[in-house]
Image: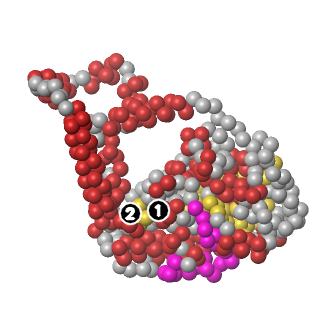
Amino acid sequence: MATYRIMIDRDMLQNALDTTQAESFTLITPGLIIEIILFGLLPILLIVLVNIKPIKHWGLYLLRRLCSVILAVLLIVLVAALFYKNYAAFMRNNSGIIKYLTPSNYIAAIYNQYDYLKYKNLPFVELGDDAYQEPSANSNGQKNVMILIVGETARANNFSLGGYSKDTNALLAKQNVTYFQNTTSCGTATAYSLPCMFSNMTREDYNPKLANKQSNALDILQKAGVNILWVDNDSGCKGVCDRVPTIDVTQKYQNASKLCQEGVCYDDILLTDLPEYLDHIQNDTLIVLHTIGSHGPTYYQRYPDEYRKFTPTCDTNEINRCSQDALVNTYDNTIVYTDAVINQTIDLLKRYDNRYNTTLMYLSDHGESLGENNIYLHGMPYSIAPKEQTEIPLVLWLSDKYEQQQAVDRQCLDVAAKTQPFSQDNLFHSLLGMFNVKTTQYHAQLDILGTCRTTLNHIEPK
Ligand SMILES: [Zn+2]
């Protein structure tokens, strides 16, 4: 670690298990031997020489130990409560540092390797082999084209569509969108939420290890004949798009667009390839745009200057140096920009209204804490996570043609959006429902349009 600046994690353990004798010998250097003698053998020798007295009063001894453990835990809780902001930002900016801590690093690596091997050899389970697209009763003969925008770190609380006092959704407010007032996420981090929302498992019975070992909504739609395209401007699709066509626009346009620099791009980049793609659609199509959205702690890097609507802003990754106001302003500007990206995508779909039945859905992966109860960022265990991390925005836009074709009851939908709870559990079934895909995997009661289609009989016997 000291010489090669490596970290001990599961990958490094895997390297050690896979290495050859020749490779191992090249690592055994005089420096290593001196290190082992100085920091290994010498301390052991000193410990051996210590004269250990036998314990006379076990009860008293254990009590004293217990007291010092409790005291230590209390101190840690106190420090965490007082300086959460500093630690949260530091750990986020230096996430690898935990892997330098010995011995927890190799203990965690051993456990992770065991866990990895346990699930690695599980066979892939094909779901939805019975899936097919049922022709719509009111079909107008045109193809259905849906864009699903997967948000990043957008929390419901800061959407003015949901009642937030600052006007963060000025553009979407003018579009004919449905905003779902009460929507929750599956997890509090991308890597957990993303596979969960596309899987047929609900949050209650979700197993992240199994999610990538079975077909998800995209796989089943593809089987049924729907074309899929995943366009990524975030940290990858976490296995969700492994079996469908994918474009990584962050990489593609890194040195080719003014929207990109230093390994990240503004979300506008997601729309670059779309007109060309939309021009050539032959089948029903689902396009997923995976945004970088409001990813922190560098909120100020998520939007171009012209979206700096709320000031002053916090223009550093050390959010502990900013005032609460500045931090929230910066975050709100990311939502203002997200609002513009969604709005622009709807406008783009409108340009194709004469050719396709178009729809758009926007759904965030999880929320974010911005200092409420001194908690920042996201990733808290779900059971104790604050609502800021689990309440997410969900927006649906249906073109008039799609609405007619699918016989969607607008009023029913508006009432449901205002009064009923929704969650990422609904995405799997809603996507299948949007394309009229019939399969035993589909459950109408979890489809957000399921009960609001007037002529299609989607209700299943229970
Ligand atoms: Zn995320």
| Along the line of sight, the residue nearer the viewer: 238 or 41 | 41
Where is residue 449 drawn, in percent x and y?
75, 64
Q: Is residue 360 visible?
A: yes
The crowding category of the residue bearing disc 1, from other C-alpha atoms within 10 Å (few below 14, some 14 to 19, many at least 20), is some
Q: Decide if residue 394 is on the left or right side of residue 407.
A: left
Tell me which residue sits at (38%, 37%) in the image. Answer: 108
The crowding category of the residue bearing disc 2, from other C-alpha atoms within 10 Å (few below 14, some 14 to 19, many at least 20), is many
What residue occupies the far top of the structure in this picture?
21
Separation (CA) of disc 2 from disc 1:
9 Å
Quarter placement of the N terminus = top left
Q: Decide if residue 299 is on the left or right side of residue 199.
A: left
Q: How is the image coloured?
A: secondary structure
Pick whichever of labels 2 and 1 is earlier in the sequence. 2
Residue 171 lies within the magenta run = yes
Q: Is residue 257 visible?
A: no
Q: For numbered disc 2, what is the local secondary structure?
A: loop
The segment highlighted magenta reads 164-184
Tell me which residue sits at (60%, 46%) in the image. Answer: 206
| Along the line of sight, the residue nearer the viewer: 154 or 375 | 375
User: Which secondary structure is most common in the magenta stretch?
Assistant: loop
Tell me which residue sits at (52%, 61%) in the image. Answer: 390
| Along the line of sight, the residue nearer the viewer: 156 or 241 | 156
Mark seen at residue 386: 1
Residue ID for mark 2: 375
Where is residue 221 drawn, in percent x and y?
73, 50
Q: Decide if residue 134 is on the left or right side of residue 241.
A: right
